[in-house]
Image (tube, grey):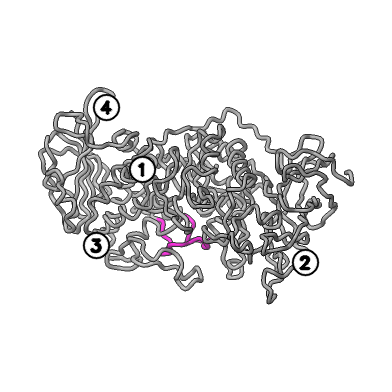
Amino acid sequence: MVDRLHPGNPYPLGANWDGLGVNFAVFSDHAERIDLCLFEPTGRREVARMTLPERTDGVWHGYLPGATVGQLYGYRAYGPYEPHRGHRFNHHKLLLDPYARHIAGEVRWTDALYGYRLGSNRHDLSFDRRDSAAAMPKAVVEDDAFNWGNDQPPATPWSDTVIYEAHVRGLTRLHPDIRSHERGTFAALANPAVIDHLRRLGVTAVELLPVHAFVQDRYLVEKGLRNFWGYNTLGFFAPEPAYLSSGSGNELRIAVRRLHAAGIEVILDVVYNHTAEGSELGPTLSFRGLDNASYYRLLPDDLRHAINDTGTGNTVNLSHPRVLQLVMDSLRHWVRSYHVDGFRFDLGVTLGRESYGFDPGSGFFDALRQDPTLASVKLISEPWDIGPGGYQLGRHPVGFAEWNDRFRDGVRRFWRGDGGQRPEIAARLAGSGDIFDHDGRRPWASVNYAASHDGFTLADIVAYAERHNDANGEDNRDGHGENCSANWGVEGPTDDPDVEGIRARVRRSLLATVMLAHGTPMLLAGDELGRTQGGNNNAYCQDNETSWVDWAAAAEPGNAALTAFVVRLTELRRDHPLLRCRNFLHGREEPLPGVLDIAWFDDEGTAMTEDAWNDPDSRTLVLRRAGRRDDGRVEILTLALNPGDDDRTFRLPEPVLPSLVLLDTATEDLEEYRSEGRELPVAGHSAVLVLAVA
């Protein structure tokens, strides 16, 4: 190997092997020098250090003849350590390449990882001269070649999409049909037992919690806990090493290919709003040491401190063109190299912020929407952050779907029996048109869910009135204080058959509301199996049975019936286009004389009046949807909702036609049955779906 680098090229960024050597390129606007450090295969010993010889438009680059795939490396950046000017260069700290496509090792916590002296009375204004290389993971030169064969993305239309939110480790860690060394990894995700379960459920997309390489937080490690969720990204191009049973990124590619073959799309939950380096008091692992003032948003009047719109201590600066390029290159990488089908953007509002606040026409959104590689993938935003004006539900650009927490809270309150919920539940069932019906957006823009990773599971929504997060070590102060949940008389597990009966009904009714509403339904992994977290509504640090799906419980009669119920719901959604309308319905068209495409009634079959909508003591509601089928006949679907304690006899609205009851959440029995006349019994805490064809 030569002892000095050739000039090389400034693009592409990262380490790229051409068969004869490797080109290294890394961005830093403010560095005065950057050294490439090479390590032997274990990563313990540095074997060479060479200065990148060229700088082009802020990109430092050099070419190393003879270097090959598998070479471990890192960077050291020289420049001013002037926190008041936003600069935190410290060449004693080994830095991970932001474009690393494979990472070896993990962060081993030591004070040497910090650019300043921990414990100094000058805090982060002090300077630490200890070398951090021994505690740092190393980037690895990677070759992305993979035989994709005839892989084709399922390209499921948004209106037909059913999302299954899952954690790679949590979903598979306890699966009995998976080899022990593969449990909790991408290999397990590719296992036929897992894919068969997903196919049976009828889901069309799996949305994976973060799989980018992430860091175990020091404060969690010191408490004997682990960052389970993974919202603490260190490498935006590399899969999390702990999810690779074989050590190869091809493991994820194989999983994607097998899921595609089953007709299932893969959506990644991605965290581009912040990094694992935390606030100015955090470690120097990569971005901070390369160019703190470029990679992070800093307070304009005090550049020592980062803007904290994310609640994590830092905010990635997507207003900088090179940082925006980093994110765009990362997204393209996952589509091109791993064939993923979409992205869910954690704290999506942060990504749309400019210096003046959130802007649907921000540089990030504009770049994303015009990119030919990303134009066909699914884009989902978590439409909030903790910064000023941080709640932006419904204000994202056309082409985005958004997690709808208004749906989550509205359906929970309705089925809890809260008063005054008729207008809210009606809007949510109709696709949340009050939020999304503008600028050409469609009902699928609303991602509808009753439970997600962030909060109670479905089972816990009906078993706990309060959070129980003591295991997190934060004195039960973390997590949401208001969960819109109810325990129905007993907090937690119970043998009381009456309480258990109500819980089962409400659970089925919540699931039915998610699946029968217009919009894109999302199911939390394990909810179909009765998964509980014991009332923990913030299990981000619980890498144990609290968070892992208990597959052994799947065979229990109640849970097996619940799984069958979910299967029935996805079948209904597939079989009846009225349940997944491509356009908003406004009650202006009449598929049959006197029958509007969408209409609302009380339990007497009377059209809702303004007084009825505003009656805080009336809780029952009937939704009727009608549309013409391909065979020319008119299909009418009537959904009767009774969130109260008492059984009721509803009267179906005119015209009354011979009907078929497709679903009744009061029972585990999934058999359809005929209904004659206007009267329709609806048990308390239950919903009934009725079909008529004219």
- Categorize mark 2 by other alpha carbons within 10 Å: few (<14), some (14-19), many (20+): some
Numbered tag placed on residue 518 in the rendering? none
Three-letter code, disc 2: Arg
Q: Are marks 3 and 2 in contact (CB under 8 Å)?
A: no
Tell me the CA gap for discs 4 and 2: 72 Å
Label 3 vs 2, first from the N-terminus: 2
Q: Residue 130 carries which label?
A: 2
Taking depth in this image into account, of 67 and 291 the one nearest to the observer is 291
Query: Which one is closest to the eye, mark 4 or mark 2?
Result: 2
Residue drawn at x 56%, y 55% as measured from the top left: 230
Mark 4: give few (<14), some (14-19) or many (20+) Cα within 10 Å.
few
Task: Give percent across and percent down for residue 356.
Answer: 50, 52
Q: Is any atom of residue 641 visible in this view?
A: yes
User: Which range is magenta?
Assistant: 531-550
Is residue 544 inside the magenta stretch?
yes
- Outermost residue to the top: 631
The image's mark for residue 436 is 1
Residue 18 lies in quadrant = top right
Viewed as shown, does residue 204 lie left or right of 663? right
**Which numbered disc covers residue 498?**
3
Q: Quadrant of the C terminus?
A: top left
Tell me what residue is drawn at x 61 percent, y 70 percent: 222
Residue under pointer 4: 629
In the picture shown, does residue 693 fall above or below 492? above
Residue type for callout 3: Asp
